[in-house]
Amino acid sequence: MDDGKTDRIETSEERGMTAREVLNLPVTISVVTAARVLGMGPNKAYQLIRDGEFPVDMITVGGTRRVLTAALWRFLGLDGLALQQ
C-alpha cells in the first residue's frame, strides 16, 4: 500500500528526512544528524557508540566524532542512488 511517504525516513524527531535530503548530506555529519536519519535520539546514538554498537562507521576529527555519510548511505541501501544523482 502506498501511503505517499515512500521516500520518507521515519524518525522519532518532529520531522524526518527524505531520501533526497539524506543523499545531499555533506561527506561527514554529526552524530546528532546521523541519529535523526536513523530514527533515534542523540542519547541512544551516544550509548550505542559507547557500547561499540553504532551501526555506521565514524572518524574522529579534532576530538569530535563524525559519521561518514557514504557509510550511512550503504547502511540505508541508498548508496546506489547516490551514484545516480
Image (cartoon, rainbow, N blue to C red):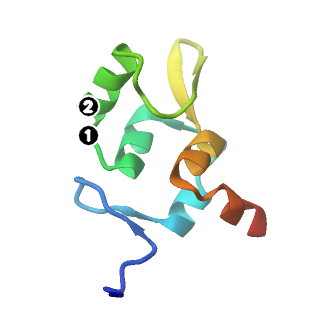
* Residue 32: x %, y % from top left: 38, 37
* Residue 14: x %, y % from top left: 22, 60
Quadrant including the C terminus:
bottom right
Can I make out residue 85 in this image?
no
Q: Where is 30 relative to 72, above or below?
A: above
Dot 2 alpha-carbon crowd within 10 angstroms: few under 14, some 14 to 19, many 20 or more:
few
* Residue 70: x %, y % from top left: 65, 44
Dot 1 alpha-carbon crowd within 10 angstroms: few under 14, some 14 to 19, many 20 or more:
some
Q: In 3D space, how far apart are the residues under numbered discs 2 and 1 (Cα atoms)?
A: 5 Å
Q: Which residue is mark 1?
A: 41
56 on left or right of 46? right
Q: Residue furthest front?
A: 1
Residue 35, quarter of the rendered image: top left
Q: Secondary structure at mark 2?
A: helix
Q: Where is 80 relative to 76, above or below?
A: below
Residue at (51%, 34%) from the top-left corner?
56
85 on left or right of 76? right
Q: Nearer the viewer, residue 79 or 18?
A: 79
Quadrant including the N terminus:
bottom left
Residue at (41%, 17%) from the top-left corner?
52
Residue at (63%, 47%) from the top-left corner?
26
Asked whether the beta carbons under mark 2 and mark 1 sit within 8 Å of each other, the answer is yes
Q: Which of the numbered marks, if any, corresponds to residue 80? A: none
Q: What amino acid is found at the position of numbered circle 2 in the picture?
A: Lys
Residue 8, quarter of the rendered image: bottom left
Q: Secondary structure at mark 1?
A: loop
Q: Which residue is mark 2?
A: 44
